[in-house]
Image (cartoon, grey):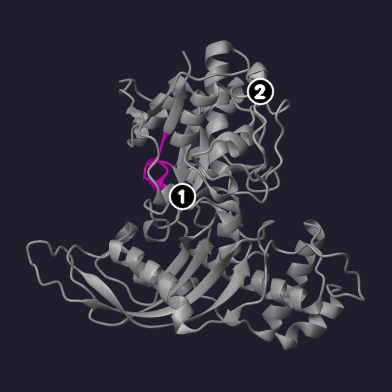
Amino acid sequence: MASWMPLLWLLGLLPGATSAPPRRAPGAQAWEPASPELLLRPARFALELYNRDLAAGARAVLRSVSGRVRRAGLGSLYSLKMTLEESPCDNPKVCQLPVSDTPQLCSFEVLYELEKHTLLSWNCDTVDTEIKGDKNDTLSSFLPLLKEDPLSQDLSVKMASIFKQFVTTYNRTYESEEEAQWRMSIFINNMVRAEKIQALDRGTAQYGVTKFSDLTEEEFHAIYLNSLLKEEVGKKMYPVKSIGDDAPPEWDWRKKGAVTKVKNQGMCGSCWAFSVTGNVEGQWFLKQGDLLSLSEQELVDCDKVDKACMGGLPSNAYSAIKTLGGLETEDDYSYSGHLQTCSFSEKKVKVYINDSVELSQNEQELAAWLAKNGPISVAINAFGMQFYRHGISRPLRPLCSPWLIDHAVLLVGYGNRSDVPFWAIKNSWGTDWGEEGYYYLHRGSGACGVNIMASSAVVN
């Protein structure tokens, strides 16, 4: 780190040069070494989730753990290094895949907050080689490529110049030499990671510098994503009946007036609320002919089943709208990006819903339903989205598991670009991210679990 000090002074990123008051990451404190005793509970939690993905009948045991801890908001972030060994499967009737006979050297990032553990990220040096991805690639082939490699001095100088441009573009300022060094090291490592994600993407997406490039992976997950989507079961919804129609070759509800402008959830894990209001906005427009921008803050404050900025589920949000009696507009109940006392007024309700439905996991049926009935609330694995700039994203399946969804968004259309099929997805990170706030994901391959949790409100 010390070798970057002259670069930081030269580029004007330290106090005494051109630095202004800081923009600090929320809750960011220095990492501290942690004793094995302190790490035992998050390590057991990580091991439990690891074992869920093993072949039937196989189990891994913890051989060693080391790591560090850092305070984060009301909780703690744990960075764990764990040695795991898989025990042989002794029941051939349930054994489906061979287990590894070599130790697994794994890294886990675990957040402990509000008396609950959440797995933010993980990777292992060796994995079950029978777990296949697209084109018969294996997960073990890819994860080592995503590790952070040391940079040459020349490349570090170039990266420092790019970091200066980033600081100017996104108006970043840091309060101390330590903070500036730390953020630039994160930025450089993130650019290496973005380059490797780029090399492994099979679509047309471009990855690189975004407004999130100075955040660690665990910060980005904790602030902007929604781990509850993969962990909790929400209110049961009725499955929708197939409409039996073929999907048109392309469709875009933005061109038909059913989609409001891109919004910004800010530093709050409220994507679930934005996904649901976007769907309800479209449903109301199709039934009543009036496009209204609806209040996400009402759901953040008044949905007592979900967890506000800590995450939530669309199915619960639909239920909350029915229980409350409807939604106010954004003008009447504006967005603050943090939990407030519920100030819902039934007199100000402008939109109601009658029910909610769970949609098909068949992407052709989803496209047909969307074209006939409006934008769809979905949840996806946000792998690579921290660095997404434009194009059609198609991460390799082992890197973007459909069972690790962590971000709720809105399908507004679909089509093809140069014969590459895509879903057009309205995100909630502002227009200064992606393609003016939109994300394009490969259609037809179940990419990143886009078809796993599709739903809609019902307005009669």
Q: Is residue 249 left or right of residue 156?
A: left
Range shown magenta: 443-454
* Rendered image: mark on residue 345: 2
Is residue 397 in the magenta section?
no
Q: Is residue 355 left or right of residue 243?
A: right
Q: Is residue 12 left or right of residue 122?
A: right
Query: Are the residues at dot 1 and dot 2 in contact (C-beta closer than 8 Å)?
Result: no
Badge 1: few (under 14), some or many (20 or more) residues near its Cα, within 10 Å?
many
Residue 274 visible in the displayed image: no
For the residues marked 1 and 2, what is the alpha-carbon distance in whole angstroms?
28 Å
Label 1's element? Answer: helix
**Residue 301: x percent and y percent?**
62, 38
The three-letter amino acid code for the residue at tag 2 is: Ser
**Residue 347: x percent and y percent?**
66, 16
Depth check: give the residue in front, 459 or 346. Answer: 346
Q: Residue furthest left?
A: 93
Is residue 448 in the magenta section?
yes
Q: Is residue 395 left or right of residue 26?
A: left
**Residue 297: x percent and y percent?**
65, 36
* Rendered image: mark on residue 228: 1
The three-letter amino acid code for the residue at tag 1 is: Leu
